């Protein structure tokens, strides 16, 4: 089913624009909740992915977070300078490194559930529980239709 037409494509009302604006707002909210830790939402995501064993190499992080390798290298450099991250040579491949959180990085990551909950509650406070469930279900449906495995798949 075609929902959009070339002749009158409503850019600012399109799903693409609304998703991008929502994502940017979500990151600004996270930045607000992370200010006391002196890290950004992007850095928080890197620490989260490493701390929850979703990625342990720069290449895996690039894939998971849709970042290019140059941006990722600069991000990892900043996190290492803040002493939140450790890089170790890969024992099987000298060209690669393994990433792990430092003790300080683990302490930041331990706050992830509290910070994420507070920021996301702030983001969706205008929605009822039913509206949030509907929005979540619809987004999950779009992702599944395009072969993306979602957290709802992992629960089953």
Image (tube, rainbow, N blue to C red):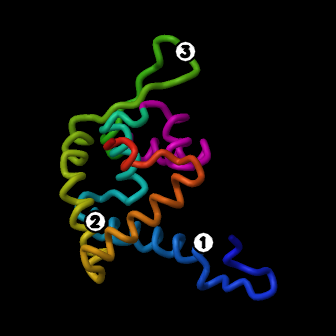
The residue segment tinted magenta is 56-80
Q: Residue at x 19, y 51 (%)?
A: 111
Which is more N-terminal, label 1 or label 2? 1
Left or right, 110 with respect to 58, comes to left
> Quick check: is 68 in the magenta stretch?
yes
Measured as percent of width and height from the top left, residue 72 is found at 53, 45
Residue 16: mark: 1
- Gap in angstroms between the C-alphas marked 3 and 2: 37 Å
Alpha carbon separation for disc pair 3 and 1: 40 Å
Nearest the viewer among 137 and 59 is 137
Majority secondary structure of magenta residues: helix
- The label shown at residue 93 is 3
Which residue occupies the foreground of this view, 74 or 22? 22
**Numbered disc in front, either 2 or 1:** 1
Element at badge 1?
A: helix
Disc 2 to disc 1, C-alpha distance: 29 Å
Residue at screen point 51% across, 75% down: 21
* Position of the N terminus by quadrant: bottom right
Q: Is residue 45 above or below residue 52?
A: below
Q: Residue at x 79, y 80 (%)?
A: 6
Q: Quadrant of residue 105?
A: top left
Q: How many marks?
A: 3
Q: Residues within 10 Å of mark 3 (few under 14, many from 20)?
A: few
To which residue does mark 2 refer?
35
Q: Residues within 10 Å of mark 1 (few under 14, many from 20)?
A: few
Left or right: where 133 falls relative to 114 = right
Of label 3 and label 1, which has the lower sequence position? 1
- Position of 64 with respect to 14 (left or right) is left
| Kind of element beneath mark 2 | helix
* Image quadrant in which the C terminus is located: top left
């Amino acid at each position: 089913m075609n929902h959009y037409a070339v002749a009158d494509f409503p850019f600012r009302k399109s799903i693409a624009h609304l998703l991008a604006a929502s994502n940017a707002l979500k990151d600004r909210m996270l930045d607000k909740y992370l200010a006391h830790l002196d890290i950004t939402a992007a850095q928080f995501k890197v620490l989260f992915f490493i701390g929850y064993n979703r990625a342990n190499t720069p290449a895996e992080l690039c894939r998971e977070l849709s970042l290019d390798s140059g941006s990722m290298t600069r991000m990892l450099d900043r996190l290492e300078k803040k002493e939140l991250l450790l890089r170790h040579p890969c024992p099987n491949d000298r060209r690669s490194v393994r990433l792990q959180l430092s003790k300080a990085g683990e302490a930041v990551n331990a706050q992830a559930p509290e910070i994420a909950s507070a920021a996301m509650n702030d983001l969706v406070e205008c929605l009822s529980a039913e509206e949030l469930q509907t929005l979540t279900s619809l987004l999950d449906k779009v992702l599944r239709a395009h072969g993306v495995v979602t957290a709802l798949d992992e629960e089953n």
